[in-house]
Every structure is written in structure tokens, then in C-alpha cells.
Amino acid sequence: MRKLIILRGNSGSGKTTIAKMLRNSLPQGSIMTIGQDEIRRQILNVKDTPNKASC
């Protein structure tokens, strides 16, 4: 069975740390992480511009 785990939280709340701990505790190749910036910039094709909040 496949599972989708979404980690949400404020900046600096430990999302990346938890994702790394999960990745290190599971068999190699069994987990994939996708960061918010990758989703926003590459999948949703949102361009970064000066003075624009990254939402």
C-alpha cells in the first residue's frame, strides 16, 4: 500500500528535519520528497519576481 504524507508548518518548524528522519529510517528508494519550492516553481510554473511573497 502506498501512502502520501504531507508535512506542513511554519518556516523553521522542523518539516525538513522530519522528512530527512523518515527518509533515513525507511529502506533506500522507498521514499520520495518534494519541496514546496519545487512544486511552486516547476510543477505549478509560478515565477519568482522581486517584491512578491512566495505563497
Image: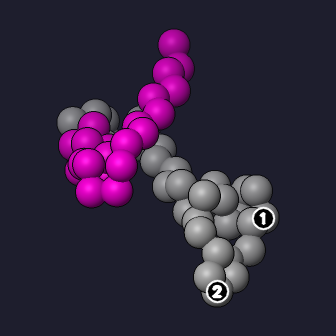
Q: Nearer the viewer, mark 1 or mark 2?
A: 2
Residue 41 falls left or right of residue 23: right
Q: Is residue 20 magenta?
A: yes
Dominant SS type (magenta): loop
Label 1, on which residue? 45
Q: Picture quarter containing residue 31?
A: top left
Question: Which corner quadrant holds the C terminus?
Answer: bottom right
Res 20 seen here: no
Q: Residue at x 50, y 21 (%)?
A: 3
Magenta-highlighted residues: 1-22
Residue 17 or residue 12, whichever sits in front: 12
| Residue 46 location, quadrant | bottom right
Residue matched to label 2: 50
Dot 2 crowding, Cα within 10 Å, few <14, some 14–19, many 20+: few
The reply to whether the C-beta atoms of the residues labelled 1 and 2 are less than 8 Å apart is no
Q: Is residue 15 above or below residue 22?
A: below
Residue depicted at x 42% and y 39%:
8
Q: Amino acid at mark 2?
A: Pro
How packed mark 1 is, by other alpha carbons closer than 10 Å (few <14, some 14-19, many 20 or more), is few
